[in-house]
Amino acid sequence: MISNTAGDRVYTQISDRLLDAYQKIHTSGDWIDSTFTHSVEQKLKKITGRKHAKLVTSGTTAIQIALLAWNIRNKKVACVNYSYVASANQAALLNKVEFADVDINGLMLLDQTFNHDAVIPVSLYGNTIDYDQLKIGADTKVVVDCAQSIGTKYKGKPDGSFGDVAVFSFARNKPVPTAGTHGALVWDDDTMTDKIRTVSTNGKINRTSPITTMGINGSPFELQAAWIDIGLDHIDEWQHKRALTHDYYVGEFEHLPLQIIQPNEFCESNYHKFAMLSDERNELKNYLADNGVQALEHYTDNFANYFGSDRKFPMTDKLCKTIITLPNHAWMTDAEIETVSQDIATQYATARHCGK
């Protein structure tokens, strides 16, 4: 099966450095929030140009920490509902969530002023919203969900450098794939530093101090930090390989009845996912699976109704029914890329022959 994600191929590439890191951790006995964690934080500051960074246990945790650090509780938070549900879940734990629809690229519609206490735009498939068009209230906090966009640039500036806080995610299906899940926050406001660090350690400055705020356990694990630390050294290389695969697919599919998600002119994408709209998604997915190719539906659930919204979200509904993603990770071989493209062409040639 040609997998949609990297699987164990990333481990094969970085195994020597990873095993060496594991030995250092074992020898030192520092398993939590130590050398590799601090190295990751320094690299994230350099990548994004931010003043501060904090590695935590997941991207989901990072969003929750940001909201708690601002004491955003029993307030209003704006989210998109074409995304992974994590952003909405974290906002809804302590707040009222209001949803915005998305454009054809799955990015938050910017057709309103977000007079909310916080707004959480999501960079999807490696592509960003047009930040210059994001209109917010005077006191609105912006948490940019960059789980899929490390390495992406908006008008020449790194994604992660926008908003009051930006959050990243590191997992097997993210641009920096790892064995488990971790996340990070980056920010500039010096007054937020102690708050974010305290919230991420159960509301305590240290183990013996009194609780000063509501908090959670976001302490990073050094073994996971080592994966991320090594992976961050390869983001340009891996992004370049994904870009080559993306461009190859675009060239091969240009005459097919597919609408490919492409970065806007203001965005230099990291090409995290090759996503396209197909009215024959189920048939295509099943055909590819039968031929050893894993294509994924990605997001299929318009979850706003679950959170009590009675609004209509026409573009979210459309994307949930038509988006499919193809394998495009950095470890694909030329033969695998060719197989995927040939299978797509064959399926549509067969469909035309059958009159579909």
Image (cartoon, grey):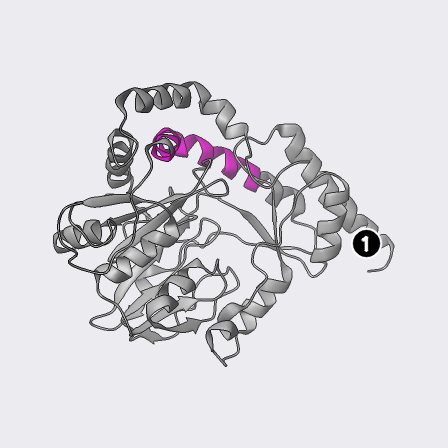
Q: Is residue 121 above or below residue 205?
A: below
The question of residue 253 being in magenta is answered with: no
Q: Main secondary structure of the magenta part?
A: helix
Specify whether 330 is left or right of 186: right
Q: Quadrant of the N terminus?
A: top right
Q: Which residue is mark 1?
A: 351
Residue type, mark 1 in image: Ala
Q: Is residue 171 visible?
A: yes
Asked where in the image residue 110 lies, by quadrant, the reply is: bottom left
Q: Is 316 left, or right, of 28 in this rendering?
A: right
Relative depth, front residue between 97 and 340: 97
Give the answer, above or below, for where 346 lies relative to 214.
Answer: above
Measuring 54% from the left and 28% from the top, which residue is drawn there?
A: 9
Extreme-right residue of the structure: 354
Q: Which residues are magenta?
A: 224-246
Front one among 217 and 152: 217
| Residue 169: % across, % down | 39, 46
Residue at 30% across, 19% down: 27
- What SS does tag 1 mark? helix
Q: Would residue 154 be visible to someone looking at this image?
A: no
Residue 318 at what x, y percent from top left? 60, 67
Q: Residue furthest bottom?
A: 310
Q: Position of residue 126 (x, y in %)?
A: 45, 48
* Quarter of the image where the C terminus is located: bottom right
Q: Is residue 242 magenta?
A: yes
Give the residue at x 45% y 39%: 180
Residue 124 rendering spot, x and y as whole percentages: 46, 54
Relative to 114, residue 277 above or below: above
Q: Residues within 10 Å of mark 1 (few under 14, many from 20)?
A: some
Depth check, front residue: 309 or 202: 202
